[in-house]
Amino acid sequence: MKKQNEYYPDKEYNGLIYAKEDLNFKDFEGCVFNNCNFSACFFVAVTFIDCAFNDCIFNEAKINYAAFRTAAFNRCEIKDVNFAMCDKLIFEIEFNDCILDFSKFYGLKLKGTFFTNCSLIAVDFMAADLTNVVFYNCDLYRSEFAKAIANKADFKTSRNYTIDPSKTKLKKAVFSLNEVKGLLFKHDVIVT
């Protein structure tokens, strides 16, 4: 018999440090997490619906069995986290002023996601659907976009990206003239 998840609606959590299994088999809806640390967590059957995470730390958290159904991350540190194994049903997230360095979004459908003022250094976006994604003022140094669909994605205020147009779908994607060199890197061309 399947274990029934505990349900937590409309609660606020402040300054908590979660242990490995503290959140397992729990559903959170309309909850706000402030200054919480999830780094030790190994999520199993955890669902977040309409939740906000403010100033939280997720570094190296194992979120393989978590569902994020409309979640906002604000000023969070989320280094080396693999989102690729999250529940894909209604996977809707946004990131504001976050550090996501070395995280993975491999193969995820991120259509219309907003990354605002984020550090996305060496992030894996390979084979992800980035249609209509907005990268607003983001650092994309060494992020990987091979086999991604980035049609209509907005990169115009972001920097340090290197994207191979022969390996990434970029139809109607928007780039700034200053950073267009990131599309020409493999041709060994100098743009001044």
Image: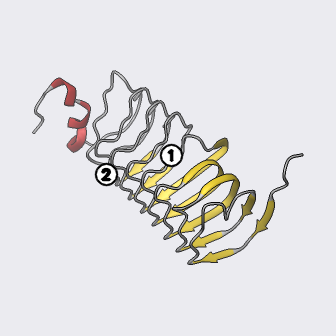
At a point 90% along the width and 46% down the height, the residue shown is 1
Q: Amino acid at mark 2?
A: Asp
Q: Answer left or right for 84 relative to 87.
A: left
Q: Would you call the spot at circle 2 few (<14 residues within 10 Å), some (14-19), or many (20 or more)?
A: many
Q: Position of residue 172 (x, y in %)?
A: 41, 31
Q: How many dots with numbers?
A: 2
Between the residue at mark 1 and the residue at mark 2, the CA separation in whole angstroms equals: 19 Å
First in residue order: circle 1 vs circle 2: 1
Which element type, helix, strand or loop, lies under badge 2? loop
Front residue of 7 and 185:
7
Identity of the residue furthest to the top in this view: 166
Q: Amino acid at mark 1?
A: Asn
At a point 60% along the width and 66% down the height, the residue shown is 19
Identity of the residue furthest to the bottom in this view: 14
The disc label shown at residue 124, or none: none
At a point 63% along the width and 45% down the height, the residue shown is 91
Placement of 191 over or under 61, stated as above or below = above
Instruction: Name the quarter where the C terminus is drawn.
Output: top left
Front residue of 127 and 132:
127
Q: Position of residue 25 (x, y in %)?
A: 75, 56
Give the residue at mark 2.
Answer: 139
Placement of 57 over or under 68, stated as above or below = below
At a point 49% along the width and 70% down the height, the residue shown is 55
Which element type, helix, strand or loop, lies under badge 1? loop
Q: Position of residue 129 (x, y in %)?
A: 51, 34
Give the residue at mark 1.
Answer: 82
Q: Position of residue 109 (x, y in %)?
A: 56, 37
Q: How was this image coloured?
A: secondary structure
- Residue 27: which quarter of the image? bottom right
Placement of 182 over or under 121, stated as above or below = above
Placement of 130 over or under 7, stated as above or below = above
Of circles 1 and 2, the one toward us is 1
